[in-house]
């Protein structure tokens, strides 16, 4: 809702007027602007500040992954962009935001009803905040990725405008439909395939893109918990164990060779699994029937590298019944330096509550827990299945037409997520019915992509000078 004026949610006309009034305070034209202020925080220093709370030996892997390209750097630079956005004007309308809504944080996954949907899939930074921040981060990610792929300026423009258009069109649709329809609205895999077919007017291009989408969906169905089990687990000395792949996957006995300390670490994780059940959505949960077998530390993502993430192997009914969970550390959101702190007592709860609000469906194993480790430090974790079907769009090798379609569907998906907790009527009215807003946000994306390239060069210089240590190839 608006930060200074409140209207009844029952008064849809007033909510629409609220959105139009926001244009007076924050003209849409200012949404296109990006100019670094003279007192802009050093981007390298911001990255260094994040390293202070992370596993020291993993931080060079994070930097090594960020070195790969300007887009890889952008994936790890959510704090930098949050800092920059905090100094810009916004519409004054708040919703639950992802905080890191770049193009790689969308994908396919399974629902409790065993359907496959396309949705946001990363909520480590989620917090209530300006809806524009998510939109700008998403759209800029497409500009940066399209540059990296060598697309022409015209192709890039079409892609980023498609992302904003998808967001604006979907938000206006959400504002026009019955309340429950807006809350339940989602895109499943079959709808996505049909949508791709409808969007392609060129028969040959349409057939190729439809086939590619069908392949992504089919591959996602193979990435389930048992698929992860077969890939990660093997027999060691007659016992099932998560297999080592150092430094990316390290079993507990490799990290903690001392038997007593290892038992304390295992007790730390098993307490998380035992206690987090009270945060699940229903009682008599299937997790109650599983018992602990083994655990390993796993390096995940780009921006998350260095946070503590454990893969936990659990046994169910018999030797053919296993489950892999991921217990991932939840640190303060990068947004909390610039917005109101979370209302929740733990960051695990912040992540899970935000995910449940923004996603159309969530993993039945999703929950949270705060546990004190043997080192005396209390840490927040959220827990979920390691894989419950999983599919993602790979921009490498994709043609501009395919990236444009993906940009539009990501924009629509982000709008659905924002429409659940924000004032979709007011936001839709602020953006308007024409394509002017689309072009303005595209202008911002172009300007901020230039900034990202400059920050990337500064980051590389910090590594070359020895200020930062990077470990590549992992």
Image (cartoon, rainbow, N blue to C red):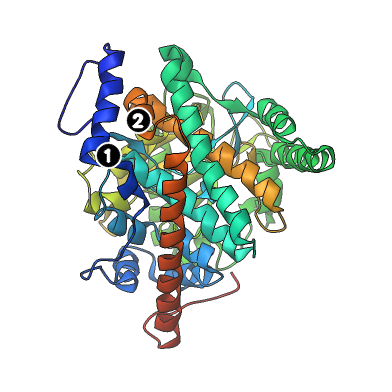
Where does the image place residue 230, in percent across and percent down from the top left? 71, 47
Describe residue 119's horizontal placement relative to residue 357 as left or right.
right
> Of residues 404 and 254, which is closer to you in this image?
404
Where does the image place residue 456, in percent across and percent down from the top left? 45, 72
Residue in the image at 41% along x and 13% along y: 179
User: Do tag 1 and tag 2 residues touch (Cβ < 8 Å)?
Assistant: yes
Residue in the image at 20% along x and 39% along y: 25
Describe residue 22's horizontal placement relative to residue 402 as left or right.
left
Residue in the image at 35% along x and 39% along y: 131
| Mark before the other along the chain sequence, 1 or 2 | 1
Q: Which residue is mark 1?
A: 91
Within 10 Å of disc 1 (Cα), the crowding (few <14, some 14-19, many 20+) is: many
Where does the image place residue 310, in percent across and percent down from the top left? 48, 52
Residue in the image at 24% along x and 55% along y: 87
Q: Quadrant of the N terminus?
A: top left
**Alpha-carbon span between mark 1 and mark 2:** 9 Å
> Residue 371, can we see it?
yes
Describe residue 84's horizontal placement relative to residue 116 as left or right.
left
| In the rendered image, the vertical position of residue 265 relative to residue 47, given as above or below | above
């Amino acid at each position: 809702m608006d930060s200074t004026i409140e209207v009844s949610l029952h008064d849809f006309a007033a909510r629409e007027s609220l959105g139009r009034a926001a244009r007076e305070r924050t003209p849409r034209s200012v949404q296109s602007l990006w100019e670094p202020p003279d007192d802009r925080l050093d981007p390298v220093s911001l990255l260094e500040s994040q390293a202070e709370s992370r596993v020291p030996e993993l931080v060079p892997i994070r930097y090594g992954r960020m070195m790969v390209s300007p887009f890889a750097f952008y994936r790890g630079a959510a704090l930098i962009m949050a800092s920059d956005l905090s100094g810009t004007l916004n519409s004054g309308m708040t919703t639950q935001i992802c905080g890191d809504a770049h193009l790689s944080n969308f994908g396919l996954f399974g629902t409790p009803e065993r359907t496959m949907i396309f949705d946001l899939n990363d909520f480590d930074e989620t917090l209530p905040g300006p809806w524009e921040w998510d939109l700008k981060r998403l759209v800029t990610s497409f500009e940066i990725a399209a540059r990296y792929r060598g697309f022409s300026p015209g192709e890039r423009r079409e892609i980023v405008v498609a992302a904003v258009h998808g967001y604006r069109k979907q938000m206006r649709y959400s504002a026009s439909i019955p309340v429950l329809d807006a809350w339940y609205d989602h895109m499943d895999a079959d709808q996505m395939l049909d949508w791709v077919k409808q969007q392609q007017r060129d028969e040959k291009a349409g057939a190729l893109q439809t086939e590619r989408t069908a392949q992504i969906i089919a591959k996602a169905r193979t990435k389930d918990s048992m698929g992860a089990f077969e890939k990660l687990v093997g027999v060691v000395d007659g016992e099932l164990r998560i297999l080592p792949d150092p430094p990316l996957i390290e079993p507990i006995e490799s990290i903690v060779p001392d038997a007593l300390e290892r038992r304390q670490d295992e007790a730390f994780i098993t307490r998380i699994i035992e206690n987090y059940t009270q945060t699940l959505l229903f009682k008599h949960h299937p997790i109650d029937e599983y018992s602990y077998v083994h655990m390993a530390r796993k390096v995940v993502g780009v921006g998350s590298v260095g946070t503590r993430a454990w893969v936990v192997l659990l046994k169910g009914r018999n030797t053919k019944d296993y489950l892999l969970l991921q217990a991932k550390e939840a640190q303060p959101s990068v947004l909390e330096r610039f917005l109101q702190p979370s209302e929740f007592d733990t960051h695990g709860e912040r992540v899970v509550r935000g995910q449940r609000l923004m996603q159309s469906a969530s993993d039945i194993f999703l929950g949270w827990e705060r546990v004190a480790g043997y080192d005396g430090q209390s840490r927040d974790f959220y827990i979920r299945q390691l894989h419950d079907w999983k599919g993602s769009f790979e921009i490498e090798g994709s043609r501009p037409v395919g990236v444009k379609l993906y940009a539009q569907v990501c924009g629509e998906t982000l709008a659905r997520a924002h429409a659940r907790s924000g004032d979709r009527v007011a936001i839709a009215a602020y953006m308007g019915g024409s394509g002017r807003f689309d072009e303005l946000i595209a202008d911002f994306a172009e300007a901020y992509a230039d900034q990202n390239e400059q920050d990337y060069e500064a980051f590389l210089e910090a590594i070359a000078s020895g200020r930062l240590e990077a470990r590549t190839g992992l």
